[in-house]
Image (tube, helix red, strand yellow):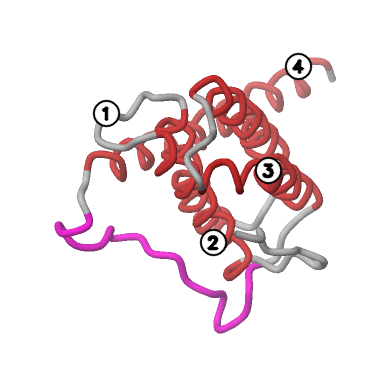
Amino acid sequence: MSSKYSIRNVLSAACLTFGLAVASAHAAEISTHKHEHGTASVELSLNNGKKWVTDEALRKGMQNIRAVMQPSLHDIHIGKFSGTQYTGLAGKISNEISHVVANCKLEPQADAQLHIIIAEIMDGVDAMEGKVKEANRQAGAIRVMNALDNYAAYFNHPGWKPLRH
């Protein structure tokens, strides 16, 4: 019985590692391509005209990201957010994404759509941390905001309130 749980834990860890690798690779791919090179082969889409179903872990994580972004928006928009503040905000967002990836259990097609949004968020986080030379920190925050808007447009999250920006 203990080996059954060990195998399950190993398989869960492997799936999580694969999911993180896919999201990271996609984020790296996005960050290296410019808009004029065309669109990515994978695009966000609805589920036969309907928003994708979410689970509690996803809703909680996305709500938490929204909650840490909202109070910072004014200072971000007027250029008064410091590098230290961007780094701190990026760390909070990254922690939430790690929790979502570890705990979210969506059906495969919804999960594939979610990975597009996660990649966009992580691309923004990298820029906010100063890791992307081609993008400033403010552009990274805007990328996260856009990802949250995409999340709201493609995923069913009852009670979701868009960022006020």
**How far, Cα to Cα, is label 1 from label 4?**
47 Å
For label 3, the crowd category at 10 Å Cα-Cα, with few meaning under 14, some 14 to 19 and many 20 or more, is many
Q: Secondary structure at mark 1?
A: loop
- Give the labeled residue for mark 2: 109
The residue lying toward the viewer, choosing from 21 and 141, is 141
**How far, Cα to Cα, is label 4 from label 2?**
31 Å
Quadrant location of the C terminus? bottom right
Q: Specify which label sits upstream in the sequence, 2 or 1.
A: 2
Could you say where residue 30 lies in the image, as x and y percent from the top left? 31, 45
- Give the labeled residue for mark 3: 65
For label 1, the crowd category at 10 Å Cα-Cα, with few meaning under 14, some 14 to 19 and many 20 or more, is few
The mark lying in front, picked from 1 and 4, is 1
Q: Specify which label sits upstream in the sequence, 4 or 2.
A: 4
What amino acid type should be assigned to the residue bearing mark 1? Lys
What label sits on residue 3 in the rendered view?
Answer: 4
Vertical position of residue 79 compared to residue 163: above or below: above
Q: Are marks 1 and 4 in contact (CB under 8 Å)?
A: no
Q: What segment is highlighted magenta in the picture?
A: 35-52
**How far, Cα to Cα, is label 3 from label 4?**
37 Å
